[in-house]
Amino acid sequence: MENQSIDVTNENTEYEQEELSKLILKHSGIDYGQILDLVPVERGTSGRLVRLKIIGTKRTMIIGKELEIRRTLSPSHLYSSAFTIDKVDVTNGIPDRFILTGAGWGHGVGLCQIGAAVMGEQGYTYDTILLHYYIGATIDKLY
């Protein structure tokens, strides 16, 4: 199955059981066996995972920081750790598939860098762009 990185459009990244266990082994160097669950342990204020428990038939560990989670769960890296995890087709406690549903891939501060860049290319000024993203804000000169 061809995997896609999680992106801002909330697309899903799906892994078959064997694919996910091999991926985690390759990126972490740890053999968890079959993956029974991926449990969000802690999320930051923007909703991104900062600690994730990987439960396997051979081992259970908590990994974290955000970058480690993103690298462990993707052939290259996930755009963000802002995602939810669903287990599908669970037989005898072992899921056949995991679905990671993305919830954005920015820094979590409310401004889309790509959108701002496009607005800049279209001639919008910095203050117009900032006020577009931060509604109700004011821009004042402090010096």
Image: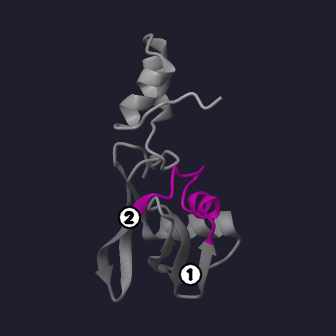
Q: Which residue is mark 1?
A: 33
Q: Residue at x 55, y 56 (%)?
A: 74
Q: Could you tell me which quadrant the C terminus lies in? A: top right
Mark 2 neighbour density, 10 Å: few (under 14) some (14–19) many (20 or more): some
State the extent of the magenta-drawn residues as a range: 64-84
Q: CA distance from mark 2 to mark 1?
A: 22 Å
Q: Residue furthest right?
A: 29
Q: Is residue 29 above or below residue 70?
A: below
Amino acid type, label 2: Thr
Point out residue 52 in the picture as x, y percentages from the top left corner: 53, 74
Assess whether mark 1 and mark 2 are in contact (beta carbons under 8 angstroms). no
The quadrant in which residue 99 appears is: bottom left
Point out residue 11 in the picture as x, y percentages from the top left corner: 34, 48
Q: Is residue 17 above or below residue 114?
A: below
Q: Name the secondary structure under disc 2.
A: strand
Q: Residue furthest top?
A: 123
- For the residue pair 51 and 109, the one nearer the viewer reads as 109
In the shown orientation, is residue 101 left or right of residue 33?
Answer: left
Circle number at residue 55: none
Point out residue 81 in the picture as x, y percentages from the top left corner: 50, 58
Amino acid type, label 1: Gly
- For the residue pair 15 and 124, the one nearer the viewer reads as 124
Circle number at residue 84: 2
Q: Residue at x 61, y 32 (%)?
A: 142
Can I make out residue 98 in this image? Answer: no
Task: Identify the mark nearer the N-term, 2 or 1.
Answer: 1
